[in-house]
Image (cartoon, rainbow, N blue to C red):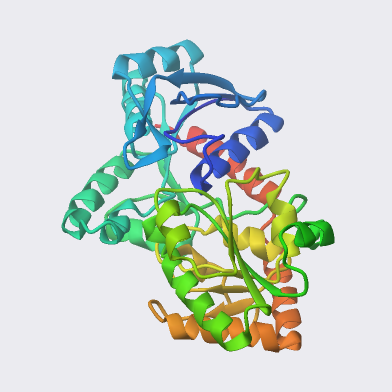
Amino acid sequence: MRLLCCTDTYPPEVNGVAVVTALSLEGLAARGWECALISPARPNGAVSTAVRRTTLPSVPVPVYPELRIALARGATVEHAARAFAPDLIHCATEFVVGRLGMRAAARLDVPAVTSYHTNFARYTRSYGVGFIERSIERSIARFHRRARRTYTPSAPSREYLRALGVPNVEVWGRGVDLALFRPAKKSAELRRTLGIGHAFAFLHVGRLAAEKDIPRILDAFRLVRESEGAAAVRLIVAGRGPVERALRRAAPDGVTFLGALDRARELPALYASADAFVFASLTETLGLVVLEAMASGLPVIAIPAGGVADHLRDGENGIAVPPGDTEAMARAMRALVHDHALRQRLARGALATAAHLDWEREIDRLDVSYRMVLEHRP
């Protein structure tokens, strides 16, 4: 079987969509699929040895230079698709490359499937342009209605798409690499290097973007630091993004920004060496970093919204806080600092949750789902 994936983001870009797409292609290649990829070119971009890759000229997004916009005509993508002769085309994103991939699938009479990873319509509120939210929803719905099947990583996202009139939506992609992210990666040396010592270390990992609501985490940490003392707590922030400079300026003492870290070589030890994970986003379709934190044995403080709600269990594997409630987040953080038994119980619950979400099992499910799409092709 031959699979062509058309995506607007791919490693070395660091985001959940890029990570899931790369893991999917590598896993399917290991299961006998011939995989090819079309994506924007990126300076010093890494190329997977398991995937044949076509890159398109691109430019950085003005307000978000970590992301690239492909500069390509439909004929370019169609030519690459025709040369590869795929049995199935997966349009993993709703932007330039994904839409050109959908057009190529129609012209070549090849079945197409899509992914819905990101709630771009909801993002508009974070960027002060909520008046275009409905327009974006209509565009997203039109795109996914053309697919034989749409994959999304959470039940709330599936119901959202169904409400927009998108048929054939399947929940897929909520997996975590249990061999990579595990408590055994804990490093006392890393804690010493970061200057954590015996302090309680809260961790946030993710893109530093407006929709993640990281200022709320900083404000909650400031309250905890004021009540517990400067030496008692630390906050570690890993990731890059368009609001990084503003966050660094606004952060209280005791916050360390690490920038972008290598997902395989550096992040596992960072997760395992922290004491708790804090997350404030309301817009996640999955929240991959939440699952990685749980697999590393960290109790999670988060808002039960979107895909996070599928896995966060208040009092079982973490603490759920209401949206917009900085005081509640600070109380949850204090509870973990003071109550060792609570922290241990939630850590065990986090590990138990992650144990049922092995990534290899998800790849097996995707393999079967793809074959079903091809078998039921009209």
**Residue 236 lies in what quarter of the image?**
bottom right
Q: Does residue 45 appear left or right of residue 58 in this picture?
A: right
**Residue 108 lies in what quarter of the image?**
top left
Whether residue 284 is visible, yes or no, is no
Position in image of residue 48 (x %, y %): 63, 26
How many numbered marks, from 0 up? 0
Position in image of residue 262 (x %, y %): 65, 43
Front-most of residues 221 and 284: 221
Quadrant into which the N terminus falls: top right
**Residue 277 lies in what quarter of the image?**
bottom right
Q: Is residue 254 above or below residue 100?
A: below
Quadrant into which the C terminus falls: top left
Position in image of residue 268 (x %, y %): 72, 53
Whether residue 198 is visible, yes or no, is yes
Q: Residue at x 25, y 43 (%)?
A: 142
Q: Residue at x 30, y 19 (%)?
A: 74
Front-most of residues 230 and 373: 230
Q: Residue at x 76, y 87 (%)?
A: 341
Q: Does residue 346 appear left or right of residue 108 in this picture?
A: right
Front-most of residues 67 and 96: 67
Q: Is residue 45 above or below residue 23?
A: above
Q: Residue at x 70, y 44 (%)?
A: 264
Q: Is residue 14 above or below residue 1?
A: below
Q: Does residue 205 appear left or right of residue 39 in this picture?
A: right
Position in image of residue 65 (x %, y %): 40, 37
